[in-house]
Amino acid sequence: MNGESVTGSRVYRVGVHLLIVLGIAATILVAIGIVILVKSGEWKFLACVAGGTALFFLLVQILRLEIGPSSFRYRNLSGSREVIFADVGRAYFEVIETSKAPQGVAVFYVDRRKGGRVKINLRTFSVAAAADLFTALESHGVQIEVPDQWAARRMADEIRAEQAKTRS
């Protein structure tokens, strides 16, 4: 789900794992819709599921991480943000803990020197995309801060392992 643009940037789209999860959920819901259609002749549920599935797959295609020589662009459903590497003041993980995720969930942020931070959902993309982003940030002198919490260390270790694999 990635490619290279004419500007020398690497473009990453959603990871295969997300598409598989969406596909499995859609298959289950379509099967339920077919059962409802056969048993009661009611087609509205199946139509809603089919339309909703198409909409979800279209929305997922919006998500993109583009890493270039001097900047990266992150596009999600709420918009697109471009961050110039020279403007990055800090790159770090925060761990959000909730009752549903007591071990926490690692969230990656990039703070700009001129203000504002960009939250990047790294799990949306492949580990290779995250490794590429880390490599680009570090090549511009930005150190990735990882707190001593299991969720952040685990995610950072996965990304570091991918970086090592890419280098060899």
Image (tube, rainbow, N blue to C red):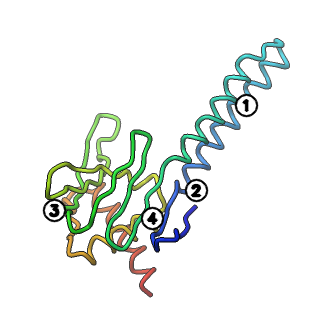
* Circle nearer the N terminus (4, 2): 2
Disc 3 or disc 1, which is closer to the eye? 3
Q: Which residue is mark 1?
A: 30
Q: Which residue is mark 2?
A: 16
Task: Measure the alpha-carbon separation of dots 1 and 2.
Answer: 21 Å
Disc 3 or disc 4, which is closer to the eye? 3
Disc 2 element:
helix
Q: Quadrant of the C terminus?
A: bottom left
- What label sits on residue 89 in the rendered view? 3
Identified by mark 2, the residue type is Val
Residue at the limit of the structure toward the bottom, as seen here: 168
Q: Nearer the viewer, residue 59 or 157?
A: 59
Task: Measure the alpha-carbon separation of dots 1 and 4.
Answer: 30 Å
| Residue 153, picture quadrant | bottom left
Q: Residues within 10 Å of mark 4 (few under 14, many from 20)?
A: some
- What label sits on residue 99 in the rendered view? none
Identified by mark 3, the residue type is Gly
Please say if 75 is above or below 38: below
Please say if 68 is above or below 45: below
98 left or right of 51 in image: left
Whether tag 1 and tag 2 are in contact, CB under 8 A, the answer is no
Please say if 87 is above or below 107: below
